[in-house]
Image: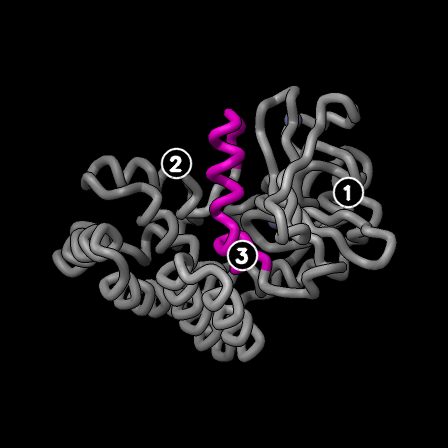
Amino acid sequence: MEKLKERVQQIKKKRPGYGEILDFYQKVREAQDEIKASLKIDPIKLKKEWKELLTKEGFSLIQKEDFPLDIEASIKLFESLCQIGKDSNPHMAEQVRKIKEALDNKKINLKNLLKKGVKEQKIEQMANEFGWDKIVFSFLIQSSIKPSIEAGMEQLRSELDPETWLKEYCPVCGSLPFLSLLKEEVGKRYLICSYCGYQWRIDRMFCPFCSNKEQESIQYFFAEGEEPYRIELCDKCHQYIKIIDYRTLGESDPVLEDLATLHLDILASKKGYKRPIPNPWTP
Ligand SMILES: [Zn+2]
Ligand SMILES: [Zn+2]
């Protein structure tokens, strides 16, 4: 956490426009960190067949809904995040106020929602029903369960080899990646799961959204003086992923680095490319 705070200060000095978003993210991370220490997660019992299916058929080990959650801790975190949201920008504050009101008036039952395993479809449906911003509600829910999800992923880590999976989706939970990393001197490339945070190796030139590997239909761009951040554009599916080069940047919180380079997303979007797995602030 100290490292993250230091990096936030560093980035804010360089790009003051990101101050508000980065402060918000830091508060969210602090709240998540606080919960982590007392988290109680049931052990995930893997069936032998699942492991076989992974090796033979390329299925992920579990489904998103299969992650055990610490419901009490998630609810507590949800409350903390609402508090942080209230002190954030006016749009977020207004949305949080509405969501909290429905919660306090028992119009929604968070416990039941979490118990059934969180589905994006259900979140969307609830947001529509109550007239909330879907992105804000989804962000609150996903951030509340994040410590549980990551703890579950850690349990399964030893079952997998991140170097040999080489597919476009996460071997743990089957979700798509939200970001890519370059590591080690030779520049090994990794993808980060948008749901559980697992990292696995992938070919250097590869669109994780349509499996395109053709050199002539993949291009890159970066902003001057910001070489560690690259955007990989795919001309087959017209989608893109952000790549962070840890070799020149050093290890850092990938979500933080993603938020601090939204200007690259704006450029990619202006060029007509879409980001399949955005963050809540992606233009
Ligand atoms: Zn995953
Ligand atoms: Zn593609």
Amino acid type, mark 1: Ile
Q: Which label's residue is closer to the chain start, 2 or 1?
A: 2
Q: In which quarter of the image is residue 109?
A: bottom left
Which residues are drawn in magenta? 254-276
- Give whichever of 102, 5 is nearer the camera: 5
Numbered mark located on residue 121 in the image: 2
* Mark 1 vs mark 3, CA separation in Å: 19 Å
Q: Quadrant of the C terminus?
A: top left
Amino acid type, mark 3: Val
- Disc 1 target residue: 202
Amino acid type, mark 2: Gln
- Give whichever of 208, 162 is nearer the camera: 208
- Residue 160 place in picture, x, y as percent: 77, 53
Q: Quadrant of residue 197?
A: bottom right
The residue at label 2 has a CB less than 8 Å from ligand 1: no
Q: Residues within 10 Å of mark 1 (few under 14, many from 20)?
A: many
